[in-house]
Image: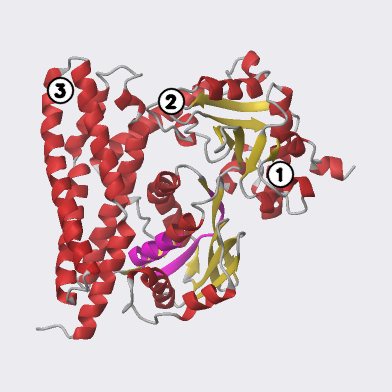
């Protein structure tokens, strides 16, 4: 049966959007680069038999990547030259199939041999140091693999409607896919904060829901690409018979005309690529019987709110395991990470008193000794209401390792305050302070009972700890005039004095702010 023109146009629009959505090329290149590094290290350390075995896998991956780049060029040329829709659809589908094939190869259990290979290498070798970034890419590629799989199933007209818990679904998706994407695409400049996550059962295509949510994340990250520090805030709240998903960013924002255009332009998927993303969001929201709204202010940020009817409260009858954990390679990675968390837990609280009394000096010293191309240091810290440091871990940036806070403190990176010292464009060192990513994790870390938890409680606690950390860093050796960037300054300091308006501002300005207890005295 020959498809009519309208069907073809819709399929072309869908394939264009999917290819735009994947954004996988740089991740594949990172994986290849990692395995090339492994090969080099094996050769340097005379582990020849392992290198020969690994090289066979690497050559196959390289060959598939070359094929993928050629097909991508064919697709790009077809789109740019306004080729017939059937031609664009055919080459687009061919490209998606090629990406799916590469992802399947990368996620094949045989690549799990990499862990065994790394065990032969010194801990300071390039490949061992860069392994965390490699694992980050693997998580992302896993997400791509399943998005393509579900796209193919949906195209096959399978009934994919089901019940799922929105809170469970989003938390799984954020951990398995979104964290990796945001870190990689923003060079760790954008911080994810998870606020309230109310459970509620939705009815519909959860894979389409994921694609819709991911599109909102992509738009938010793009809007913050000019920020030194950006915040992506995600929350779900039950409000009457509706559940409201909010995605907020601190990006460039937009004016009323742009908002109006997004809400009404291109009523179907017969459109240019740049207009498809939000059309897909609107259509998905409509499929779930929901409503969408946008609040935005130029240079301040944007909040997308999606109000959806839910079936019932509580969790879905059948829980969905995070899909990436189904793969052999990712299961092995999870076991390694679990072991690291256990080892780390044993070390917590054993930091030498000398380091606690000099933590500000230590963090700055890490920056000074960093041998990275772009020098810096990374740390995590907690200061109690009694003004005691109850958590502190740190490390300088290293030449071959793009370290993240998850690597630095795997058990507590969502619950503690995180920081970096980096250089501005004029080579002046600057301090970046980030609030806890997950509200629930922070409350549990601070032993706050369920009945005492609230959004205002979180804001006040974080605000006060920001101030205590600033004071502690200065008291322990950090220069008071170092510039500071804070995540979500408007949220935690809404009635801030004029000196806090322009970032970066001197650390001593933050230290001089009054704690809640001092204001009430």
The residue sitting at 45% across, 58% down in the picture is 217
Q: Read off the magenta span.
A: 192-216
**Mark 3 lies on residue:** 50
Q: What is the C-alpha distance between the residues marked 1 and 2?
A: 31 Å
Q: What is the C-alpha distance between the residues marked 3 and 2?
A: 27 Å
Residue 425 part of the magenta segment: no
Against 476, residue 251 (above or below) is below
Q: What is the C-alpha distance between the residues marked 3 and 1?
A: 52 Å
Q: Quadrant of residue 461?
A: top right
- Please state the horizontal and vertical placement of residue 387, each as a whole percent of the image: 74, 29
Way the structure is coloured: secondary structure
Which quarter of the image is occupied by the C terminus?
A: top right
Secondary structure state at the residue bearing disc 3? helix
Secondary structure state at the residue bearing disc 2? loop
Disc sitting over residue 398 in the figure: 2
- Front position in the image: 199 or 119: 119
- Please state the horizontal and vertical placement of residue 250, each as a whole percent of the image: 58, 56
- Please state the horizontal and vertical placement of residue 505, each as a whole percent of the image: 70, 41
**Mark 1 lies on residue:** 463
The residue sitting at 87% across, 45% down in the picture is 520
Secondary structure state at the residue bearing disc 1? helix
């Amino acid at each position: 049966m020959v498809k009519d023109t309208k069907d073809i146009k819709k399929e072309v629009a869908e394939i264009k959007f999917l290819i735009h959505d994947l954004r996988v090329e740089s991740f594949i290149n990172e994986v290849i680069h990692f395995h090339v590094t492994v090969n080099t290290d094996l050769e340097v350390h005379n582990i020849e038999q392992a290198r020969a075995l690994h090289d066979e896998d690497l050559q196959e991956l390289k060959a598939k990547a070359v094929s993928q780049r050629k097909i991508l060029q064919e697709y790009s040329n077809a789109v740019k030259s306004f080729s017939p829709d059937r031609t664009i659809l055919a080459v687009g589908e061919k490209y998606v199939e090629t990406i799916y094939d590469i992802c399947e190869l990368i996620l094949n259990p045989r690549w799990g041999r990499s862990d065994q290979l790394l065990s032969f290498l010194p801990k300071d070798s390039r490949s061992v140091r860069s392994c965390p970034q490699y694992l980050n890419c693997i998580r992302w590629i896993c997400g791509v693999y399943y998005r393509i799989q579900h796209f193919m199933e949906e195209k096959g007209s399978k009934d994919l409607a089901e019940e799922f818990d929105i809170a469970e679904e989003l938390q799984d998706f954020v951990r398995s896919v979104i964290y990796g994407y945001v870190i990689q695409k923003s060079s760790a400049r954008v911080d994810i904060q998870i606020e309230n996550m109310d459970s509620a059962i939705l009815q519909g295509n959860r894979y389409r829901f994921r694609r819709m949510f991911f599109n909102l994340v992509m738009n938010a990250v793009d809007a913050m690409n000019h920020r030194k520090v950006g915040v992506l805030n995600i929350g779900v709240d039950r409000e009457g018979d509706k559940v409201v998903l909010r995605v907020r960013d601190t990006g460039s924002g937009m004016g009323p005309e742009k908002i109006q255009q997004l809400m009404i332009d291109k009523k179907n998927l017969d459109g240019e690529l740049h207009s498809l993303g939000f059309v897909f969001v609107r259509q998905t929201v409509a499929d779930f019987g929901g409503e969408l709204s946008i609040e935005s202010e130029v240079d301040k940020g944007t909040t997308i709110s999606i109000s959806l009817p839910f079936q019932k409260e509580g969790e879905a009858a059948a829980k969905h395991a995070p899909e990436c954990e189904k793969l052999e390679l990712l299961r092995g990675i999870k076991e390694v990470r679990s072991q690291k968390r256990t080892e780390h837990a044993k070390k917590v609280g054993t930091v030498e008193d000398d380091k606690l009394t000099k933590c500000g000096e230590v963090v700055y010293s890490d920056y000074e000794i960093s041998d990275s191309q772009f020098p810096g240091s990374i740390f995590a810290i907690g200061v109690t209401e009694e003004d005691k440091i109850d958590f502190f871990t740190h490390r300088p940036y290293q030449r071959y390792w793009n370290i993240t806070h998850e690597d630095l403190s795997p058990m507590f990176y969502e619950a503690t305050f995180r920081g970096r010292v980096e250089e501005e464009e004029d080579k002046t060192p600057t301090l970046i302070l980030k609030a806890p990513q997950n509200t629930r994790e922070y409350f549990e870390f601070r032993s706050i009972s369920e009945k005492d938890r609230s959004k205002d409680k979180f804001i006040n606690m974080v605000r006060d700890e920001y101030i205590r950390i600033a004071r502690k860093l200065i008291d322990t050796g950090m220069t008071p005039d170092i510039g500071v960037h804070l995540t979500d300054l408007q949220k935690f300091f809404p009635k801030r004095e004029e000196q806090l308006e322009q970032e970066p501002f001197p650390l001593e300005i933050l230290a001089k702010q009054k704690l809640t207890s001092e204001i009430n005295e």
